[in-house]
Image: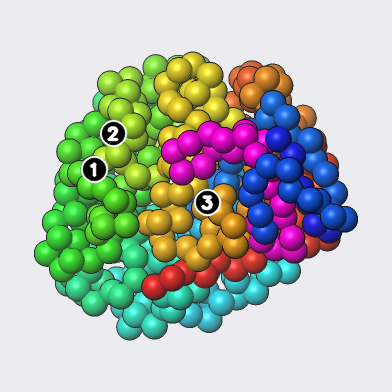
Amino acid sequence: MNYIIRNANIVNEGKIVSSDVLLVNDIISKIGNGINAGNAKEINAEGKYLLPGAIDDQVHFREPGLTHKAEIYTEAKAAVAGGITSYMDMPNTVPNTLTQQLLEDKYQRAEQCSLSNYSFFMGASNDNIEEVLKTNAENVCGIKVFMGSSTGNMLVDNEKTLEGIFSRSHILIAAHCEDEATIRQNTELFKKEYGENIPVEAHPLIRNVEACYKSSEMAVTLAKKHNARFHLLHISTAKETSLFDNITPLKEKRITAEVCIHHLWFDDSYYKTKGTLLKWNPAVKSAADRDELLKAVLDNRIDIIATDHAPHTLEEKNNAYLKAPSGGPLVQHALPAMLEFYQQGKISLEKIAEKMCHAVADCFQIKNRGYIREGYYADLVLVDLNKPWTVSKENVLSKCGWSIFEGQTFQSQVTHTFVNGHLAYENGSFDESRKGKRLTFDR
């Protein structure tokens, strides 16, 4: 079915313009006023805002091997309900995505069941560099390096291996940066004081600013040394923002950075009420760190806003600090959370579209997505800025069945989500008759 979205306030490329948008098959066919709709179905968007579909460059959908927590099918639906039309999934599944065959297996699974568009990172370990270098830059988003603890055989702490990846890679390298030696040392200090009963409030002291900065600085230094295309994931400290500049245009940057929703929203005072539900790696830190991260988003030292959506069951999260896993679900609530910041006067709609849509497309060189342009894929999200709703267990769509935002009332609501011109989500209902597509890259 073709669609025409009438009288939308289009948020795109630094401007807000009222216009119609005609969707024909997969693409945006025409943007303008008074478009002849023909046999297209009309959607009245008067008073609403139309943004490009958000692109989330960091999710953990847990498939294969960890599907008691989440799976591609459930989490892609949650993403679409939250206005995220494309995602990039991480390799720390079971088994770890360390071969080209295991990588392709994930693509084949997504083709069968993902309502949202998709890409998957190739994983690096200390001993698979030759396999990593086989990665196709045109249809794989990048290489993921865990320069900090991770699942299975994915901690890359061998200096020779890191030099090899940064010097030989022809594709974007994304990294989780926390210094493992610092974390282990800090953990032992707290164990001496508390034994196995370390309070969760110690999390940002164990995974502290220095652990983050030491690893991030090393990665940035390696990237500069080898002129590698490097993307630092989920920075959590004010100190790390000093490693990045605000060169424009973004496409000229060789080193880029990302911040996640939880590091922009929460600070260490929330550990008392949220407990281990707030346990993420890197840790949520001080209010001063949080505030500087938002400042760095606004002045373009930080390029992308993402989620690091990483579900665990409530049973797992409700363990004591040392046993509770890190991470939580966020794809359904990321865009509403940023729109709440807009309502509070902290960020503009244009900047939200830039950081969650345009910049991701530019950083990863995604073909024909991330913008509302004629000829581009019709990945679009329509939001009502005056439709309050409250997050509850009953409306959480992630398989794990909980959210850090439970009890939070958002003033804005996603009403329609188009994926490749297909109306996949409308006012709480899904149309799963068409699946998303594999992202491709202009490299």
Residue 19 colored in magenta in the image? yes
Please tell me the numbered disc located at residue 246: 1
> Dividing the image into 4 quarters, which one contains the N terminus?
bottom right
Q: Callout 3, which amino acid?
A: Tyr
- Residue at position x 26%, y 55% from top? 253
Query: Please, is residue 117 above or below residue 8 in the view?
Result: below
Q: Earlier in the sequence, mark 1 or mark 3?
A: 1
User: What is the magenta range?
Assistant: 8-28
- Residue at position x 66%, y 54% from top? 30
Q: Nearer the viewer, mark 1 or mark 3?
A: 3
Pointer 3 local density, CA inside 10 Å: few below 14, some 14–19, many at least 20: many
Give the spatial CA distance, label 2 vs label 1: 7 Å
Q: Which residue in the structure is indicated by mark 2?
A: 299
Cβ atoms at labels 2 and 1 below 8 Å apart: yes
Q: Callout 1, which amino acid?
A: Asn
Please tell me the numbered disc located at residue 371: 3
Q: Secondary structure at mark 1?
A: loop
**Seen in the image, is 108 located left or right of residue 309?**
right
Q: Secondary structure at mark 3?
A: loop
